[in-house]
Amino acid sequence: MNLRHTFFVFAISFCSVVQLQAQLDKIENLKEDDSKRIRFGYFLGLNAVGAKMEYKPTYVSTPFRIAVKPKPSFDVGLLADYRVNEFLNIRFHPGVAFVEREITFPFSKNDSRFTKALIERVVKSNYVRFPVGIKLNTRRIRNARPFVMGSISYNMNITSEETNSEDNSSGNFRMKRDVYAWEFAVGTDIYLPYFKFTTSLHGFFAISDEFVPDENSNSVYTRYVASMKSRGVFLRFTFE
């Protein structure tokens, strides 16, 4: 699922929710809901996470580039929301994100040194996530309230293989366990008769380098790689 497909799914989902909300527009649901100081909920979501790669100078006509293609995956989690005032909330929304990426090294399949399994990999990462965000709300419009949210997060990649002695020469793509990131989200809270339903689109931008070079400093797989930072989109459905 590339970013264009993710935005398309979000648009369809958002339009469906807005259409549902319009049917209920004559009735203002959960009138006392916003007066609660603390709220809890859970979320389900889809994600497409790739990576921003940076490289060292190669001084050759064909630069070394690793292709990183995101694959559609999913995430789940909980949330705790503290209401500061009508327009400001502080939100803790931890979860687990299951991420898959297709990684292709720029080597020829005709080169006897490299098998297809060494050139093309599917790298799976399971992130235990701890984001804390500031949520800015508009005024409630009948049964809807749009918002934007900025978060910082600590993410633990529990399948990073960072300490594994086997590296790319054995087909093992290693990444760092600890990842720090900032996130930005836009969405709309929909007040239904018995609960609040939210659709939101989140951008994920790692600020720490996740790349682990091979043991051999002259490894053909990693010697030209300077850094790797995850970039992704999360489509989230929240129930409160």
Image (cartoon, grey):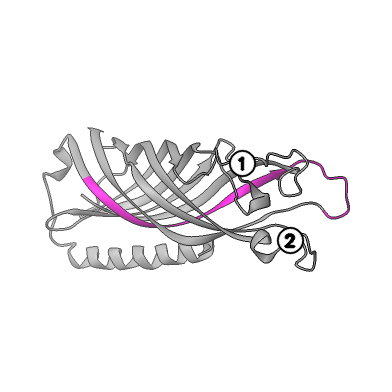
Which residues lie in the magenta part? 41-62
Q: Position of residue 67 (x, y in %)?
A: 66, 57
Q: Can residue 85 be seen at all in this image of the molecule?
A: no
Q: Residue at x 50, y 57 (%)?
A: 100
| Of callouts 2 and 1, the N-terminal one | 2
* Secondary structure, magenta segment, majority class: strand
* Kind of residue sitting beneath label 1: Phe
16 and 240: which one is in front? 240
| Residue 72's disc number | none
The residue lying at 56 percent from left, 35 percent from top is 208
In the rendered structure, are the residues bearing label 2 and label 1 in contact, judged by CB atoms less than 8 Å apart? no
Residue 100 seen in the current view: yes
Secondary element at tag 1: loop
Residue 58 point in image, percent of width and height: 83, 45
Residue at 76% over, 49% down: 220
Which numbered disc, 2 or 1, marks the residue closer to the eye? 2
Q: Secondary structure at mark 2?
A: loop
Q: As rendered, which of 17 and 182 lies closer to the eye?
A: 182
Residue 180 in picture, x, y percent from top left:
49, 35
Q: In the image, is 159 to the left or to the right of 224?
A: left
Mark carried by residue 211: 1
Residue on which disc 2 sits: 114
Q: Amino acid at mark 2?
A: Phe
